[in-house]
Amino acid sequence: MKKRLTAALALASLLVTLGAYAEEGAALPGATAEPAQSIAETAAAPETTATPEATPETTAAPVSSEIKTTTEYRWFVNQYRYTRGRTVTYYDNVYAINHGDYGLTPFAATVPAEYFIADEEGYYALAPIVLDITDAMRERLYGADLGETAMFYGQYCERIRDKVGRVGFSGVHEGIDFVNLAGCDLHAILGGEVTRAGDSNGTVGIYSAEYDITLLYLHCEKIKVRRGDVVEAGDLIAVEGNTGSGSAYTHVEMRQGRHTSSSTYRDTQLTSDCPYAVMQTALGVTDSGRHSLTYADYLEAERQREAAEEAARLAEEAAKAEAERLKAEQEAAERAAQEAAEAEAERMRLEAEAAARAAAEEAARAEEEAKRLAEEAAKEEEPEFELIDILPGSGAGYGFGDDSSAAQASTTPAVEATLPPSNP
């Protein structure tokens, strides 16, 4: 504290000297024309005492001239489902995560613009340094690179309905939410004096005199510290729980000065302080220049997803068409084979019938020929008989022949027949 006070006095003396040179029109050797930055601006928070304390200088990301704010009248629905209308100023359409779901959401305009970037579509996203700072806080909180950052400072909370069905934001987020596992150990991000050790929200408050801030950890369970304890950075303070919340996560909130309680639950205006500048200094975070997930990335991913789905659909349709073609070809081949088989069977049937008719005709001809030959043979073998139609010893005949009245001289007389005797 003594060293900081000495540094503050030295800085104040230097500023007075610079002011004197400016009034007299003199220039200091090597001095620049840029105005000196106050200690309060360096800490990104208002002064809390009459004598400013010197804090280590931070490296902030350049402010984008494309980052603009919007002022509108918006509805807010509190935890009791009552609606309040407020005219608020905010950054609109910032692509960020809210407990697992990415989307476009407003951020309070009290968050410095340097912590946002604009993508090629004109939408905003969190600057890489914000991700670096929250990662450093998360690793200190969980003691390792565990869990994830689920919600950011100044982010508008989810939209809900009031008692009559009107939709509004449930408030503005006063801190940063970290999620790991229910019951996992929680460690102090910064050392200091414990100002609170439990309440209905499971709050642990630790005041850091070095940076004149209080870090408040909400929803804790199995709190390991008591009010008045002095802890070091990394000391175990509690486990992650859901005290006063609907699920297990840890809400970390920063307030300038010494405090024993967190800000009002999801108010329409921020009452806590932006933690990024102090945390960057305290944790020694440097800008990694990593790529922040932007809405343009989301749109590109959606385009690629849709293109992949369209390609899959076309491939499926092509596969179905090919299957239908093959099926049609197979059915046509089967029909052709069946028709060919039927035609062949019909041909064979007709040939068989023709052969049967030819055989029958040939048999008939053979039978006729056989009959004819038999008749001819019979004619050739039959002896010739001469019919004599005369009675022996007389010129009279029996009347069978044509010449029964004429005697045939050439005929040898027949032996006279002997008649049997008549009855006596």
Image (cartoon, grey):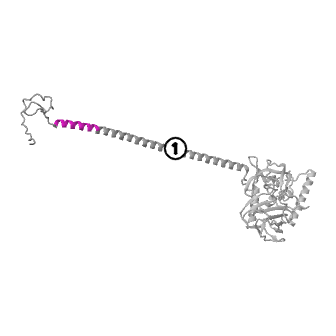
Q: Residue furthest toward the front?
A: 424
In magenta stretch: residue 21: no
Q: In the figure, 176 relative to 361: above or below?
A: below
Which residue is at the front of the view, 70 or 126?
70
Q: Is residue 58 found left or right of 307 in the rendered image?
A: right
- The x and y percentages for residue 254 are 82, 61
The quadrant the C terminus occupies is: top left
Task: Name the magenta segment's main secondary structure.
Answer: helix
Residue 258 in the image, given as x and y percentages of width and height:
86, 65
| Residue 374 is covered by the magenta coloring | yes
Image quadrant where one finds the N terminus? bottom right
Q: Amino acid at mark 1?
A: Ala
Q: Is residue 289 left or right of residue 404?
A: right
Asked if residue 83 can be seen in this view, the reply is yes
Whether residue 188 is visible, yes or no, is no
Q: Is residue 387 above or below residue 331?
A: above
Q: Quadrant of residue 347?
A: top left
Q: Position of residue 18 (x, y in %)?
A: 90, 55
- Residue positioned 64% across, 48% down in the render: 309
Towards the viewer: 146 or 218? 218
State whether residue 69 is above or below residue 133.
Answer: above
> Residue 177 versus residue 417: which sits nearer the camera?
417
Residue located 89% across and 51% down the image = 27
Instruction: Tell me where residue 337 sits by quadrant.
Output: top left
Q: Which residues are magenta?
A: 364-380
Q: Is residue 350 left or right of residue 186?
A: left
Dividing the picture into quadrants, the one containing residue 141 is bottom right
SS at mark 1 in the image: helix
Q: Nearer the viewer, residue 148 or 39?
A: 148
Coordinates of residue 360 in the picture (x, y in percent): 31, 39
Check disc 1 and report the residue beneath it: 328
The residue under the point 28% across, 39% down is: 363
